[in-house]
Amino acid sequence: MSETRVRTRRKVSAGLPVFPWDTIEAAKSRASQHPGGLIDLSVGTPVDPTPRLAREALAASADAHGYPQVWGTPALRTAVLEYMSSRWGAPELTEKSVLPVVGTKELVAALPSQLGLGADSTVVIPTCAYPTYRVGALLCGAQIQAADSPEEISGEPDLIWINSPANPSGRMLSLEQMRAWVEFARRTGAVLASDECYGEFSWDAEPISVLDTRVCDGEVTGLLSCMSLSKRSNMAGYRAGFVVGDPEITSELLAIRKHAGLMLPAPIAEAMRVALGDTADVTEQRERYQRRRAVLRPALEKAGFRIDDSQGSIYLWATRGEDCRATVDWLAERGILCSPGDFYVEGTSDHVRIGLTATDEQIVDAARRLSV
């Protein structure tokens, strides 16, 4: 009987952090035992319906017997350009500046590698940040610097991530801060990637795109705006996103992604095209989150929480002045699950992220539980 042997291979996952949500399973179990059931405010997944127009477009395009194009359809690219111009004040661009992606999380994780970065490269991420920025840098072996302003950066980085409104904190960058990042990136030759997936949800400040002509002066070299319909149009299950900006960068990404087969399915592309022209449903969703925020924020404050930042996004960045894991447990006893701040920072945190991603009835119930 012959013996077979598989060579030992490097496990890429060994260099990555533990998947954050795996670390709150005990709290989820505890919260689920509440007599009223679990109210899960830990994940930013929409609970409201996908707009009817998008669903109808998806169904009407279901006869997709041929392979889709990685670049999407001409109609989708036109819709993206019109949306960026009319909603976000972007300058006149050609379709070479547009690239559909299979959800922006995939783009965030893959961008450093697809830009050719490696061990001699540096990726800058916010000090309090969506974990996938760090994961993308780790996957290509790049060095990581955490910074919230250009003054905090040493050397000349290769890629800079900014995020406004921010996940998890809801912090928003002003026009002056956005311009400072653009000027720094131009001076150092870095690619500046702005994650703007929560842009439609702002409460206490104006949302601004890096491609706004007031920010970039009509010049998009080195700049990328990353957008998603997951939150804007409750299409998280569609994995519909896009990146817009420097045509040299988007063309290079397109060439790489053709080889990798990173294609947006044709029915998704058509649903995405229709959704980008739909403002009524976006307004309705914004009003839903605003209504839930108006219930949950004062209830948290009355229960002894302080809300920091939170000018935008669909989260409240809250603290009781204790280790975040203690706060997770305190909320779990009341049947409420949140995400601990140490998901998003290096080391410990005294904040938790509490989502508005529950039904109106559940948010009211959560507010009631906080008062008991």
Image (cartoon, rainbow, N blue to C red):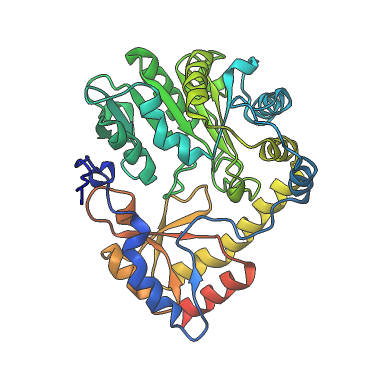
Looking at the picture, tell me which residue is in the foreground, 372 or 265: 265
x, y percent for residue 356: 54, 60
Quarter residue 98 falls in = top right
Would residue 192 be visible to someone looking at this image? Answer: yes
Image vertical order of residue 325 relative to residue 78, above or below: below
Give left or right: position of 236 versus 308. Answer: right
Give left or right: position of 106 versus 136. Answer: right
Quarter residue 119 falls in = top left
Give left or right: position of 354 versus 1. Answer: right
Residue at 29% across, 22% down: 157
Quarter residue 133 falls in = top left
Badge count: 0
x, y percent for residue 314: 53, 53
Looking at the picture, tell me which residue is in the foreground, 108 or 148: 108
Looking at the picture, tell me which residue is in the foreground, 174 or 238: 238
Residue at 41% across, 33% down: 110
Residue at 20% across, 45% down: 5
Image vertical order of residue 358 relative to residue 120, above or below: below
Residue at 58% across, 27% down: 70
Would residue 164 be visible to someone looking at this image? Answer: no
x, y percent for residue 164: 48, 38
